[in-house]
Image (tube, rainbow, N blue to C red):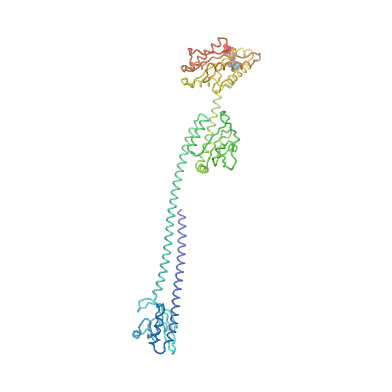
Amino acid sequence: MNLIHFKKTKSFWFSTIVMLFAIICIQYFVENQLKQQQQKRLEQFAKIYSEVFKQIYVKELEPAYHETQQVFSQMQDNSFYTSIIAPDGELLVDTRLHWSEISKVENLASLPEIKALNNQNNSLHLSRYDENQQYSASFFTTYFTTNDNQNLIIRVGQNNKAINQLIINIRVQVAAFLLTLVTFYWLSLFSERNKISRLASRHTQELKSKITETAQSYIDLQQTSSCLSVANSQTEAENISLQFLAHILPNVKTEIRLDPINHSQREQFDMLDCWALRTSKPYLADNSSTQCLHVKQQMKNTSDFVKCFPLMSQTSIYGVLTLYFNQQDYQHVENTYSTQLVFLCQNLSLNLSRIRLRDALDKKAHTDPLTDLWNRRYFFKKLKQWTPNQPETSAAFIMVDIDHFKSVNDSLGHDEGDKALKWVSKTLTDMSRESDIVARLGGEEFALLCPKMNKSQIQTFFDRVSKALTDYKLSDTRSITLSMGVAFTVNYTIDNDELIKAADKALYKAKNQGRNQLCFADSQNIISIDSFEKN
Ligand SMILES: Nc1nc2c(ncn2[C@@H]2O[C@H](COP(=O)(O)OP(=O)(O)OP(=O)(O)O)[C@@H](O)[C@H]2O)c(=O)[nH]1
């Protein structure tokens, strides 16, 4: 800013000096012209006057004096005054004096113009201070010859007051012009300075608020990252990220779509539909460019730009983050939040990877390798998390045991027994609902936790499972049968220990009563869940 100002000032002074110089030259020229014109007019006047005087003058001076006085009194310009002087300096005629006063005037031979003329000049111009008249005057002095061959001097003078006044006027006008120019310049400079300072303060303010906004977004991002690092599920991680985006980009519509492989309930989403995932980098599309196929038509129609950020690692794809902008928001986000968005996506991807890895390990730790059902540990963990005092968490606890399984192993071998175990597992899973937990507790023993199931529903379940098992034939054409013991949490008074013990007793009863049957619990019998887990 200072540099610009300096340059402006420098060029201004340079142009001012040039202008001043030009004005002085013009002024000098004008003044010179004025003086030349004055001299010309003095010469002309002298010529005319001497001609008139010559015509009128015949030996007698007085009549000539009066006649010329009369002739020249009619002239408009009476600023000229004329003297006729004899070569020896005697004043003969003077237009400013009365005839009677002329003879009283002293000899004029000592006047500078008469002296100079006598020193061999035929005519001359001279400006000097006229002490008699007390003002500065210009004189033209020359010889002329009368008709009777007398050599006389004519001197025409003019008061310089008018011309001096003219010159002063010109100078005043030039000075006024320059002063106005300088004033205007400083005024414009001042207003420009004010404008620049206002602009600078506005920019500073904008910069300040942008820095504050950016700093705040980094604080939010840090907090979001901390939450993401302890997120328990993909849904939780997704919600944390969406919350952050809604906070920093309140006007931008945001959407996260995760890989449906681990999310069977989600809307199907083909990862090849997204150009960001194909190219492994953010993809921006406006209304005229190729859009990703997963982008919602309605959202696309109401936005100027759609930008997708891939959620992926080097080896896996987790999903995509999509932002829908209008023109103005897009610029703002690009300028202020582009780094934060990339960081968020990296962080989210990292945590999705962590959650998936943990889920996979969890699943491995909680799954029975032979049947792929939940194992004993997982089942009792779930059962411990049960809250029996809430009506909506009421459930049926079913214990299942294959009848005479030992004889299957003994007669047909372990492989045949394993096949039978897998078939029973599949049948139990197929016949149960999605909300039920089906587990293999060990050996030929299974358990189900079925929320909101009544006696008749259990009976139907048992009948369907038994019927399905008759379709499976062992190699010796035998069929498999099951016994089930069931206890309920419907009366809200039984805790988990009671529930297990009751179901176990019911199963025991079913075995004792001949197997291949279903028995419901007698809730009076109690054993502890811990002792049951140890079995
Ligand atoms: N093939 C196979 N057999 C198993 C597995 N785990 C346990 N068993 C067998 O399951 C049989 C369980 O027999 P028992 O506890 O006596 O019960 P049961 O023969 O079914 O008699 P009831 O329960 O009284 O009807 C044993 O022979 C175990 O060896 C397994 O993973 N695979």
Kindly indicate the quadrant of the structure image that contains residue 460.
top right
Number of labelled discs?
0
Residue positioned 52% across, 30% down in the render: 235
Up the image or down, 163 lies above or below 20; here it is below
Residue 95: image x %, image y %?
38, 82
Q: Nearer the viewer, residue 441 or 156?
A: 156
User: In the rendering, at what x and y percent does residue 318 appear?
Assistant: 56, 33
Q: Quick check: 7 above or below 68?
A: above
Q: Quadrant of residue 321?
A: top right
Ligand 1: image quarter = top right
Q: Position of residue 532 (x, y in %)?
A: 51, 16
Q: Residue at position x 45%, y 75% from top?
A: 37
Q: Residue furthest top?
A: 513
> In front: 395, or 151?
395
Query: Left or right: 287 with respect to 38?
Result: right
Image x and y of residue 114, in percent = 40, 83
- The residue closer to the viewer here, 301 or 398, is 301
In the rendered view, tell whether residue 117 sits above or below residue 401.
Answer: below
Task: Determine whether, in the image, residue 68 is placed left or right of residue 240.
Answer: left
Question: In the visual, does 83 lie left or right of 235?
Answer: left
**Res 163 quadrant in image:** bottom left
